Each structure stands twice: as structure tokens, then as C-alpha cells.
Amino acid sequence: MPCQSSEKLNEVVIEAKKFTKYGKVADYIPALKKANPNDLSVAIYQPDGTCISAGDIKKKFTLQSISKVITLALALIDCGEKFVFKKVGYEPTGDPFNSIVKLELNNPSKPLNPMINAGALAVTHMIKGHSIEDRFIRILTFVQELAGNSNVAYSQEVAKSEFESSFLNRSLCYFMKQHGIINEDVEELLDLYTKQCAIEMDCLDLARIGLVFAMNGVEPTTKKRIMPAEVARICKTFMVTCGMYNASGEFAVRVGIPAKSGVSGGIIGAIPHRFGLGIFGPALDEKGNSIAGLKLLEILSTKYSLSMF
């Protein structure tokens, strides 16, 4: 079923788009600098298979940190909750997503949560497979299944650009390797992680993934269970507490939905039992979140009482 353009949703996009001028696109990954900072689009996918949208929802972008939620789900399926959280903590952090500070201060020295870079790298390390290629195919296949789209692929250009500029992530990996959180070759893990972050899709694909989380792991139109309900619950909880980097507390107050952002400008939303939401707006605020995407969600949450709280 094609996604229908919505006049009411378009009015919200026009209002939120005014804020793009206050943000800027990510530039520390060279390939992401090419994005148009004025872009803003949204798709909302509902359990009956209908979809409404506004903006150019077919414009593709890479998942970046949104992939952290998906690999967490796969790692929980592969290894179980007890094993995963032996290596990664549950707690939010007030530090930037790429900070090394808490790794040095904590004892035992493990990442505070799976949504910061150190935690996400530790989670990706847990994905099972006989090789890097095998593990990436498992991640990509899982993403395709969640999105209901076997054509979802990854951007080789973004993956290469990210791999070549991942000096801070290398530092995080070596620190964790010293403390026994990871035990594989750092360059191989970074190759896998940067490909995971470079998986590319549009707003509709992202909204479909959000809907599976919203419906506790079931794709409602096919009734197929893609992940256990408990895995979906854990992932949504982290989306609420840690999904918007170190702006998660304010986001919980202003918007109050499970969501996860990425520095490409994507945001996934999973409104429990109601719908999945995919946003793309590459102009970022100082925390690394889509500045107009946040405003769009704030308007929608206020207008339609979306907050869980």
C-alpha cells in the first residue's frame, strides 16, 4: 500500500522546518557533509498497513546510531539478556555519545549503556557469525526483515568514510579490549560496525521498523513475530532513557516516546501499540540530534497526546 501524503502532517513539517537554520549537518564523517540541511520528511506507519507522510520520504539516509537499537535486539536474541548486560550497563549518561570518560571512571570498566558508542561497539562484538561478512549479512538480513524490504543495503561510500575517520571509536575499542569487554581484532570490529551504521533506507522503511518495536516484536500486517516481546520491551526502554544521546531526559519530558536518533539526521519512533515513525532531517543540534526532527516530534506529541507519561 503506497504512503499517502497528509496535509495536516505537511503543516507540522513546514512549522518544524523553520528550525533547520539553527542546526548543521554532521561533518566529522566526511561523506555525511553532502546532506542538504533544509531537508525534513516524516512517515507514520500504522498497524493496519496504512501510512501517511510529508516531505520527500523516499530520500535515503544511513542509520548511524539508530542501528544500535537493532543490533541490541539481535545480540539479545543471540546471547540473552544476562550475557549482554554482563558486558554493557543499563544506565543513562550525561556525557556525549562518543565520550571515553565513564569507561575510565567505572569499575568494572564497561560501557554505561548500549546506546553510546562504546556500548554499541561492545554489542556489535556479540553478534554471532563465522566471519565479519557472515555477521554483517545477519545484521543486514535482520534489518531487511524488520523493514519488510529485501532491497535495503548499505552505502559503501559512507562505510569507507566512517571507517577511515573512526579514530575515537578505535580508542574506545582498544580501551575495552584492555579490560576484557571485547576480544576480537579492533580493525575487523570497526569494519563491521561502520558497515552497520552505513545501512541505508528511507523514512517509510524506518517507520516500518518502528512499528515492529511498537507492536512488541510482531509485524502486524503479516502477524509474523520478528523478535521476542521481551527483547522489544528492553530496546524500547533504552530508547526512552538513552535514545537521544545526552538530551534524553529533556526529550522524555517534551515528547515522551521511545525514539532513537542518528547523526545522519534520522529518528525512529515506536509509539506503543499505535504506530511506527520515521523522520529524516540532517541539520543537527549541538547534541547530535535532528533539530527540526525533534521539533516535529514535540509538535506531534503535544497535538496528539503521544507521550507515555
Image (cartoon, rainbow, N blue to C red):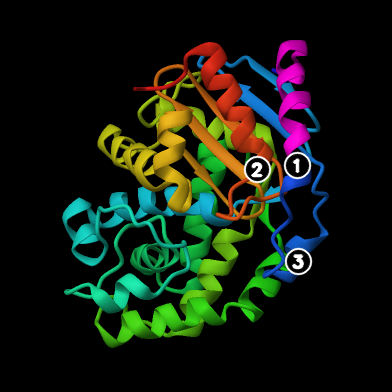
Q: Is the Cβ of the residue at disc 3 closer than 8 Å to that at disc 1?
A: no
Pinpoint residue 272: horizontal percent, then vertical percent.
40, 23
Whether residue 138 sits left or right of residue 82 in the image: it is: right
Q: Main secondary structure of the magenta part?
A: helix
Pinpoint residue 119: horizontal percent, then vertical percent.
36, 64
* Location of mark 2 (residue): 291
Res 132 visible: yes
* Location of mark 3 (residue): 31
Whether residue 59 sits left or right of residue 95 in the image: it is: right
Pinpoint residue 132: horizontal percent, then vertical percent.
49, 73
Pinpoint residue 60: horizontal percent, then vertical percent.
74, 45
Helix, strand or loop at disc 1?
Answer: helix
Measure the C-alpha gap from mark 2 to mark 3.
Answer: 20 Å
Marks 2 and 3, the one that precedes in the sequence: 3
Q: Which of 96 and 164 is in front in this view?
A: 96
- The N terminus lies in which quarter of the figure? top right
Residue drawn at point x = 63 percent, y = 50 percent: 285
Density class for disc 3 (Cα within 10 Å; few <14, some 14-19, many ≥20) is some
Marks 1 and 2, the one that precedes in the sequence: 1
Density class for disc 2 (Cα within 10 Å; few <14, some 14-19, many ≥20) is many
Q: Quadrant of residue 295?
A: top right
Under mark 2, the amino acid is Ile
* Location of mark 1 (residue): 20
Under mark 3, the amino acid is Ala
User: Is residue 12 on the magenta stretch?
Assistant: yes
Magenta segment, which residues?
4-19
Marks 3 and 1, the one that precedes in the sequence: 1
Q: Nearer the viewer, mark 3 or mark 1?
A: 1
Q: Is the Cβ of the residue at disc 1 closer than 8 Å to that at disc 2?
A: yes
